[in-house]
Image (cartoon, grey):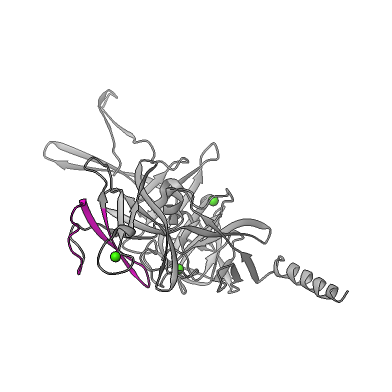
């Protein structure tokens, strides 16, 4: 009988903590193993990578007796893994044998050897090694190695952490990957990270924004961060209810703690169905999604690194345009009282340039946004490049003189 009041107390407490006005929400996490090479690359944004070198690293001897050996060094936060790859036979199409100097004695021995399995993802070939389990630096490392083509290798964790929650009536999945592979979950990208935040040692955030049950788009794994579902964890994170949160991970890695950011906000507007922006704000990088032409942001000044702008066609399917601001990042200010019009975006216009070299004419077709920024890429609803348009030259009477096809790039 004595236990009852406590049970009731817990029940009430639980209701309050997940309610509509919750400022702090706990999300229990489950570890999920990667099922294929596509997941391994997409959900880690490639993990930690290194290019091959035919020369052995300092302190290592040439690897004799192996076919076409190449060396690599994978720099994890607390340890560097040195390895060598080779082919199992002269006929082997890819590097399918791998040695990692796990004990750091500068030698590659039989117990450090792994066999790879070739796997095809779209038009790309990967050789997958693992999973391997080792104790390194007094921590457990569970990882896959993926060889991509003849140039580089990835090391990725064995899986990712996933949970499900509800915020302001929106149910969604979210999760994290130990992208920098230091055994700690929840590392944030350094403030001032570049366009994708890569190389700054953070972990990868997963948010199923569109509710299709999948994180990101496997077809464009390398550009997954552009679509707001898989990107390096930032200090402030927008979740599908449109609000901003700070994400912490409990020490044992068993749950995420979401803390609502209550800074004053203002509106930004862009004439389109949906948009995703890569921004730099007071607290560093930020990825923001807008719906039906607007989104909320905390007040302040922002610089834009990239934008993905989506508009629906007659069938209601989304076409997406990508703008990268390499040289100058457009700035805008968000205030409480008046919505800010973004200084880039639609309407787009087609621009035809003609260059002349002797008797040769060169036509180039590009797309510009309302401020003259060039649109870097267009994706069809199937995430393909659109069909290349034709150029038709006619004489004064309308007779076709020449037809040519434009080429991408
Ligand atoms: Ca060794
Ligand atoms: Ca980490
Ligand atoms: Ca999704």
Q: Where residue 300 sits: x, y (%)?
A: 49, 73
Q: Residue furthest front?
A: 110
Placement of 373 over or under 5, stated as above or below: above
Q: Measuring 82% from the left and 71% from the top, which residue is drawn there?
A: 8
Residue placed at 39% from the left, 39% from the top?
386
- Taking depth in this image into account, of 313 and 12 the one nearest to the observer is 12
> Residue farthest to the left?
358
Measuring from the top left, give residue 226's x and y in whole percent: 44, 55
Residue at far bottom of view: 2
Image quarter where ligand 1 lies: bottom left
Give the total number of marks visible in the rendering.
Answer: 0
Eyeballing the image, is 382 above or below 143? above
Query: Can the viewer see residue 171?
Result: yes
Whether residue 344 is visible to the viewer of this picture, yes or no, is: no
Quadrant position of residue 73: bottom left
Quadrant position of residue 107:
bottom left
Residue 10 spot, x, y in % from top left: 77, 72
In percent of the image, x 59 and y 51: which residue is there?
211
Residue 244 against residue 310 in the figure, above or below: below
Q: Nearer the viewer, residue 121 or 227?
A: 121
Left or right: residue 349 compared with residue 266 = left
Please state the horizontal and vertical placement of residue 388, each as a whole percent of the image. Answer: 34, 36
The C terminus sits in image quarter: top left
Which of the two residues, 291 or 44, is positioned nearer the viewer here? Answer: 44
Q: Is residue 8 left or right of residue 400?
A: right
In the rendered structure, which segment of residues is drawn in magenta?
58-85
Closer to the camera in the image, 117 or 16: 117
Does the magenta run of residues contain 76? yes
The N terminus, quarter of image: bottom right
- Whether 242 is among the magenta residues is no
């Amino acid at each position: 009988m004595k236990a009852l009041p406590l049970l009731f107390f817990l029940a009430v407490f639980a209701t309050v903590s997940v309610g509509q006005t919750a400022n702090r929400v706990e999300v229990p996490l489950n570890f999920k193993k990667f099922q294929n090479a596509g997941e391994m690359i997409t959900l880690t944004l490639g993990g930690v990578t290194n290019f091959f070198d035919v020369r052995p690293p300092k302190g290592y001897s040439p690897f004799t007796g192996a076919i076409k050996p190449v060396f690599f060094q994978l720099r994890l936060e607390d340890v560097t893994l040195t390895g060598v790859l080779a082919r199992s036979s002269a006929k082997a199409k890819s590097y399918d044998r791998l040695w990692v100097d796990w004990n750091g004695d500068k030698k590659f021995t039989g117990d450090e050897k792994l066999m790879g399995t070739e796997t095809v993802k779209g038009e790309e070939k990967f050789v997958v090694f693992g999973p391997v389990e080792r104790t390194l630096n007094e921590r457990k490392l569970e990882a896959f190695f993926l060889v991509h083509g003849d140039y580089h290798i990835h090391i990725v964790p064995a899986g990712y952490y996933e949970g499900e929650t509800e915020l302001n009536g929106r149910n969604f999945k979210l999760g994290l990957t130990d992208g920098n592979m230091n055994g700690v979950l929840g590392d944030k990208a350094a403030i001032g990270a570049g366009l994708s935040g890569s190389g700054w040692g953070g972990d990868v955030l997963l948010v199923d924004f569109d509710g299709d049950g999948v994180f990101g788009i496997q077809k464009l794994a390398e550009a997954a961060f552009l679509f707001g579902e898989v990107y390096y964890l930032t200090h402030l994170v927008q979740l599908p209810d449109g609000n901003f949160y700070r994400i912490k991970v409990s020490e044992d890695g068993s749950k995420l703690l979401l803390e609502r950011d209550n800074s004053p906000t203002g509106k930004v507007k862009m004439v389109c169905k949906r948009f995703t922006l890569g921004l730099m704000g007071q607290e560093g990088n930020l990825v923001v999604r807008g719906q039906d032409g607007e989104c909320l942001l905390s007040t302040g000044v922002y610089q834009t690194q990239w934008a993905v702008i989506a508009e629906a066609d007659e069938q209601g399917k989304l076409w997406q345009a990508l703008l990268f601001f390499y040289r100058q990042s457009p700035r805008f200010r968000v205030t409480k009282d008046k919505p800010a019009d973004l200084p880039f975006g639609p309407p787009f216009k087609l621009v035809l340039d003609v260059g002349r070299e002797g008797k040769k004419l060169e036509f180039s077709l590009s797309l510009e946004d309302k401020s003259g920024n060039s649109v870097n890429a267009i994706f069809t609803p199937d995430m393909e490049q659109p069909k290349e348009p034709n150029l038709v030259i006619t004489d004064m009477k309308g007779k076709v003189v020449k037809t040519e096809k434009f080429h991408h790039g």
